[in-house]
């Protein structure tokens, strides 16, 4: 039966994706649920909770109010909290019950906005379909749309200013946006390493969307020359932004020494030609071959980036497995998208693979055989804080150091 | 001190110190049981990760429902999923089918589905449970109904005829060091039975043959009533207390209950065993008070069910209680709350889930917090790591709390680590 899950925990849900992507922006995140969904997010999907002063709340939805449609109870609670806590915006985030009773997130958001006089966003997430990735896309997409006018003005101003300073566009450092990076995907250390590597290679980070960021960055997103899609969510957003604002994107991450060289080669090309690119779809230089097959189970963009390094290291075939659902991006990346626990565990147990990289929870179900190389990739959206202490930096040559260490 | 109006209904903040065992961990106490959750995929992530953390993930499974199931119902999905599980796992004696909040609006006849599974798998006990915090403020919140379902797994033919007393409402076992064990043994040779002690389902069923139930938490009242009606037990409500007088009265009531069944030995206060326990506790209180050197104490409702009763008891023992962190006043705590309103106008009361609690208050941290949530919100330097009255009862409970306080002030707490190790779920 495809629907019975016995070994793996449910992965982070869509509402966690919304909250994670907006967490650091100074808003008030209100999850419309009884308690448990908020408990999922703050307890298991948000590593930044401890010592945080961010405003994440549960509306405390109760049965009678849900049945009678007593929306005013919750509107009142939100308004009172907003008046006192002074958030920069309010996000109303859905859960299964509001979905079943047909709660009008858009309408209620509009109603609150009229009375609170700050931006209010309604997200009709339901914890039932998709996963955190869909929430990240939903949240960031709405924010890009909301700040688009500001962004367009800033883009004009920014470009003029840069041209004046550098005597023309050619001398300016290329600006990049990092799209779709959330704490459900990346550790803080990996993001820091990525930013440092970008700067070392002469790029200016214009905005990070999903973590380690500020609300102001949305107002200048259009100043970037290239969007860097670092996850499936990032890729979906990048495609959208390309269509709307003609911003080219590069999908991938610099993983490993060879992978990083390939990545920056692709980035230079995208910046120069303005043509979007998936780094894993460009030819990769292989120093040797004969290492056999590998499988990487992760977000498809991260998996594909790891795949580039593995191919460069001499693996002949790398199977990419997305744990977070099929979408336009996974089809372009040619990633497999298991639709049940059974299929995930089949991928984990592929007999013809010598190398497997995945979250420790998944690796623990691998039937070990001689010569297997297993590499842990702790993923917060999967194993949460239970495996967070085993995180490591795979960006840049961090990958090579780890692989060497494991081999020793 | 505020009087009632400080208990506001606001948006709820959930601090890192919030939470407890959660229904899943509690239901998993039933030996050889398996918990199947029929719910939207995101619903039970906390429960599954909690199960992994506490080592019983292999006893849980999930059937994820989809929007189309919401429309068409999911009885057959459950039948199929339960079938697949039970064909593979032959050691399961009790299967709990849990539905989530959404089911309150779908109306699956989950009891009927449970019966169908039972009929298909003779010998298997199947119970339907609701994990529906949306019903939290009704007369039957999820903990109350689930706890009753756990005990309803005991076959109804059991009769309350054995010299034993069940402790109902405590999830962590009360330690055998507690004077209750000796007290019951000396009152007609009664033994103590508690759920957490069992690893075998057949052995657990002997709780249906105990003559008495001692109800330690109000949430277990419904279960006690069920057991009285089904097995013929007799129940006495004797809530966990840290007040010496209340404890004495509790033993007196227990003595009376047993006397109706067997020859009781005199007034409890005259009994050497209880007197010795009381004397030992007085010394423990003295030692703890000396160790704290008038350090301020914060009492949290994450530590105990009745924080105001505890605060009042501690004040009467000479401790400097400065603040009570409580979301509300539970019925059984109201007399203490009302007394404190009169006696301690300076006592501060804070709702841990109030929207204001999201921003940590700055101030003195040289204080000892009883309970993780209060300790977090006040950033207490010292922490007595008590949660949900776990393992407490009688004079022993007071003594143990005093030891915890004494131990707590020996060195500054690594609160973050304590919270992570406890592994609470909301």
Image (cartoon, coloured by chain):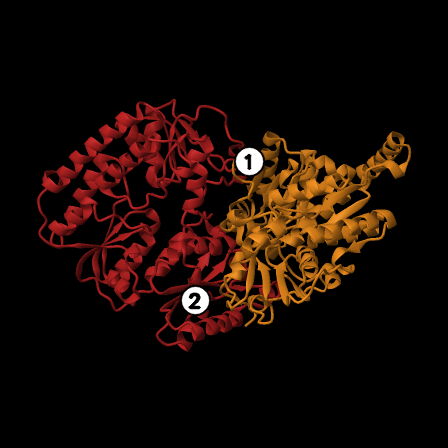
Chain colours: A orange, B red
- Mark 1 crowd level (few <14, some 14–19, many ≥20, 10 Å Cα): some
Q: In what element is the residue under mark 1?
A: loop
Looking at the image, how many numbered discs can be counted on the residues? Answer: 2
* Labels 1 and 2 share a subunit: no
In screen coordinates, is A262 left or right of B170? right
- How far is mark 1 from mark 2, CA to CA? 43 Å
Determine the residue positioned at 60% across, 38% down: A78
Q: Residue at x 66, y 58 (%)?
A: A303
State the residue lying farthest toward the right.
A168
Q: What chain does badge 1 belong to?
A: A
Q: Is residue B197 left or right of residue A163?
A: left
- Is A245 left or right of A100, judged from the image as shown? right
Badge 1 is on which residue?
A: A52
Instruction: Please state the chain letter of the residue tagged with numbered disc 2 in the rendered image.
Output: B
Image quadrant in which you'd find residue B97: bottom left
Q: Are marks 1 and 2 in contact (CB under 8 Å)?
A: no
Q: Position of residue A21 (x, y in %)?
A: 65, 45
Instruction: Tell me the residue that label 2 is attached to.
Output: B111
Answer whether residue A80 is visible to the viewer in this image. Answer: yes
For label 2, the crowd category at 10 Å Cα-Cα, with few meaning under 14, some 14 to 19 and many 20 or more, is some
Q: Nearer the viewer, residue A350 or A161?
A: A350
Residue in the image at 54% along x and 72% along y: A1
Please name whichever residue, A143 or A91, is drawn nearer the observer in this view of the structure.
A143
Residue A271 image point, x, y percent: 83, 47
Q: What element does badge 2 sit on?
A: helix
């Amino acid at each position: 039966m495809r629907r019975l899950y016995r070994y793996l925990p449910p992965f982070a849900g869509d509402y966690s994706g919304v909250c994670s992507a907006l967490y650091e922006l100074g808003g008030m995140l209100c999850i419309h649920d009884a308690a448990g969904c908020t408990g999922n997010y703050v307890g298991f999907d948000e590593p930044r909770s401890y010592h945080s002063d961010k405003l994440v709340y549960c509306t405390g939805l109760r049965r009678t109010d849900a049945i009678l449609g007593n929306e005013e109870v919750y509107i009142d609670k939100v308004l009172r909290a907003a008046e006192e806590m002074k958030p920069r915006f309010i996000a109303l985030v859905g859960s299964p019950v509001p979905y079943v009773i047909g709660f009008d997130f858009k309408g209620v958001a509009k109603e609150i906005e009229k009375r609170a006089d700050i931006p209010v966003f309604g997200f009709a997430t339901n914890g039932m379909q998709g996963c955190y990735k869909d929430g990240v896309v939903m949240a960031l997409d709405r924010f890009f749309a909301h700040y688009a006018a500001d962004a367009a003005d800033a883009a004009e101003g920014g470009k003029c200013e840069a041209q004046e300073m550098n005597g023309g566009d050619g001398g300016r450092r290329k600006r990049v946006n990092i799209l779709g990076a959330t704490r459900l995907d990346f550790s803080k250390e990996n993001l820091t390493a990525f930013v440092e590597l970008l700067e070392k290679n002469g790029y200016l980070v214009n905005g990070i969307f999903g973590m380690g960021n500020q609300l102001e960055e949305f107002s200048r997103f259009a100043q970037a020359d290239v969007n860097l899609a670092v996850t499936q969510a990032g890729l979906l957003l990048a495609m959208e932004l390309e269509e709307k604002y003609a911003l080219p994107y590069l999908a991938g991450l610099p993983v490993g020494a060879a992978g990083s060289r390939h990545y920056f080669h692709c980035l230079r090309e995208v910046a120069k030609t303005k043509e979007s690119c998936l780094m894993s779809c460009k030819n990769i230089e292989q120093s040797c071959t004969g290492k056999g097959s590998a499988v990487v189970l992760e977000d498809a963009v991260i998996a594909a980036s790891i795949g580039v390094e593995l191919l460069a290291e001499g693996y002949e075939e790398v199977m990419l497995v997305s744990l977070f659902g099929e979408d336009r991006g996974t089809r372009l990346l040619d990633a497999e998208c298991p639709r049940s626990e059974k299929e995930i565990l089949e991928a984990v147990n592929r007999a013809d693979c010598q190398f497997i990289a995945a979250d420790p929870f998944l690796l623990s179900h691998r039937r070990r055989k001689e010569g297997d190389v297993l590499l842990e990739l702790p993923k917060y959206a999967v194993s949460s804080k239970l495996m967070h202490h085993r995180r490591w930096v795979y960006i840049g040559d961090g990958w090579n150091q780890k692989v060497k260490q494991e081999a020793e | 001190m505020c009087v009632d109006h400080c208990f506001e209904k606001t948006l709820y903040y959930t601090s890192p110190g919030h939470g407890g065992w959660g229904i899943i961990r509690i239901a998993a106490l039933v030996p050889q049981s398996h918990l199947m959750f029929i719910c939207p995929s995101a619903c039970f992530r906390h429960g599954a990760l909690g199960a992994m953390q506490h080592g019983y993930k292999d006893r849980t499974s999930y059937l994820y429902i989809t929007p189309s199931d919401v429309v068409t119902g999911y009885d057959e999905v459950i039948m199929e999923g339960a079938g697949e599980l039970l064909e593979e796992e032959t050691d399961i004696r009790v299967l709990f089918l849990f539905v989530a909040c959404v089911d309150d609006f779908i109306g699956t006849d989950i009891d009927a589905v449970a019966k169908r599974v039972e009929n298909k798998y003779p010998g298997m006990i199947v119970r339907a449970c609701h994990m529906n915090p949306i019903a939290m403020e009704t007369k039957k919140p999820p903990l109350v109904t689930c706890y009753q379902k756990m005990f309803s797994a005991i076959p109804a033919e059991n009769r309350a005829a054995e010299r034993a007393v069940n402790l109902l409402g405590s999830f962590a076992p009360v330690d055998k060091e507690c004077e209750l064990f000796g007290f019951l043994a000396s009152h007609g040779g009664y033994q103590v039975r508690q759920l957490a002690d069992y690893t075998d389902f057949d052995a657990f069923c002997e709780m249906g043959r105990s003559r008495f139930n001692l109800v330690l938490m109000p949430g277990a009242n419904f279960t006690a009533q069920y057991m009285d009606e089904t097995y013929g037990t007799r129940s006495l409500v004797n809530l966990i207390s840290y007040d010496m007088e209340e404890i004495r009265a509790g033993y007196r009531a227990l003595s009376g209950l047993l006397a109706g069944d067997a020859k009781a030995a005199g007034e409890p206060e005259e009994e050497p065993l209880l007197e010795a326990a009381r004397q030992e506790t007085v010394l423990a209180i003295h030692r703890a008070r000396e160790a704290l050197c008038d350090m301020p104490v914060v009492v949290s409702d994450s530590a105990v069910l009745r924080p105001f009763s505890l605060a009042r008891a501690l004040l009467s023992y000479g401790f400097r209680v400065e603040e009570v962190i409580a979301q509300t006043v539970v019925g059984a705590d109201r007399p203490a709350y009302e007394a404190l309103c009169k006696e301690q106008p300076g006592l501060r009361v804070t709702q841990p889930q109030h929207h204001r609690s999201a921003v940590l208050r700055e101030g003195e941290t040289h204080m000892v917090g009883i309970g993780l949530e209060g300790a977090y919100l006040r950033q207490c330097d010292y922490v007595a790591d008590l949660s949900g009255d776990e393992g407490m009862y009688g004079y022993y409970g007071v003594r143990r709390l005093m030891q915890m306080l004494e131990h707590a002030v020996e060195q500054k707490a690594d609160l973050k680590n304590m919270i992570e190790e406890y592994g609470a779920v909301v």
